[in-house]
Amino acid sequence: MRSTLLLAALLLAGCAKPPPAKPTGPAVVATPESWCPEGFEPGANNTCFALPRTTNPKTPILLYLHGMFSGQGSSDEWSNVRYASDKGFAVILPRGRRGMCAWKAEAKDAYCWPGETEEAADIESVIAEWEKVLWQVEALLEPGTHKRYVVGYANGGYFANHLATQGAFPAAAYVVIGGGELHPPKQGVKPAQLLLVTAEHDPAEGQKMVDLRASLEKAGWLHARCTRPGERALSKDDIDLALRFFQKTDPKDNRDAKVTMGLGCEGLSVAQAGDPTPAKPPKDVAKGQKK
């Protein structure tokens, strides 16, 4: 009997599966999923960027501030912004912060830019997050002078206006599309070239843009305003208009010193756009990295 039980135990042991072998290779570390739209590369601090096919020592950089969005955002909006890289601009696409649209319940998880109620420190920290990607993109371009321009749409337009009128971010020119006033222009701030773009079928934002223009005129701030046909949604024509405006702010391409772009634009004289004050590279950027 005992020998029978022993034989059965041996047979069962032989049928048992051996324990799985321990992995001997390096541990696999999961990389966080990028939110970057098609055609954009992941950049530092959760940003994205797209470079033009060909570059030169004066390839300009466009910083785009998106409208409020949830999830992955609008593929049409990203595609229209990506168009700027086809026109020779290096495009940087930072993302706003979740929870800054908490003025209504359905938008509490959306990505937005700081508004009037945010503390100055919050606004400064958002801007500081762009520093690394700006240096990253400049390092990928040919060494030279790469002027910076800003386009803001809807919620991003409000924030772009804040940056321009408060002197919070150095750029050669700004375009605000469908975004009204946050604050009156700050005393002592050097005026940046500014274009306001309003859709005909957007009366609410249109009135805010009228109020913004009145504020700019009161402050003697040089600017231009365009009313274009259609709805508020960002279009490729908006981006094309912005790029042409940026070209007009370059004194070499602005021989008549006027903005005459059509699309209902009311052109005002455009002064020479000053180059932004060069910033020092981030402390943790490797030494020897080209600008």
Image: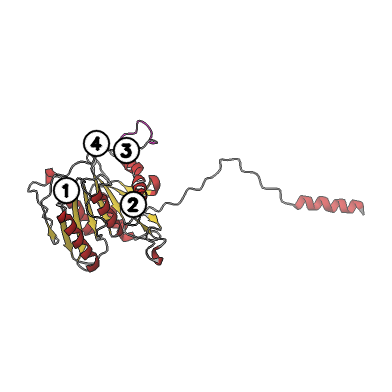
Q: Earlier in the sequence, mark 4 or mark 3?
A: 3
Q: How is the image coloured?
A: secondary structure
- 13 left or right of 78? right
Q: Quadrant of the N terminus?
A: bottom right
| Residue depicted at x 38% and y 58% | 100
Residue farthest to the front? Answer: 187
In space, the residues marked 1 and 3 are separated at their CA atoms by 23 Å
Q: Nearer the viewer, residue 236 or 148?
A: 148
Q: Earlier in the sequence, mark 2 or mark 4?
A: 2
In space, the residues marked 2 and 3 are separated at their CA atoms by 19 Å
137 vs 155: above or below: above
Res. 35 in view: yes
Q: Earlier in the sequence, mark 2 or mark 1?
A: 2
Predominant secondary structure, magenta span = loop
The magenta segment: 284-291
Q: Residues within 10 Å of mark 2 (few under 14, many from 20)?
A: some
Whether label 1 touches label 3, CB < 8 Å: no
Residue holding disc 2: 39
Mark 4: secondary structure:
loop
Residue holding disc 3: 139
Residue holding disc 4: 144
> Label 1 sits on what residue type?
Gln
Mark 1: secondary structure:
helix
The image position of residue 175, as x and y in percent, is: 22, 54
Say which mark, if any, is on residue 247: 1
In space, the residues marked 2 and 4 are separated at their CA atoms by 25 Å
The mark closer to the camera, 2 or 4, is: 4
- 215 left or right of 40? left
Res. 86 in view: no
> Label 3 sits on what residue type?
Ala
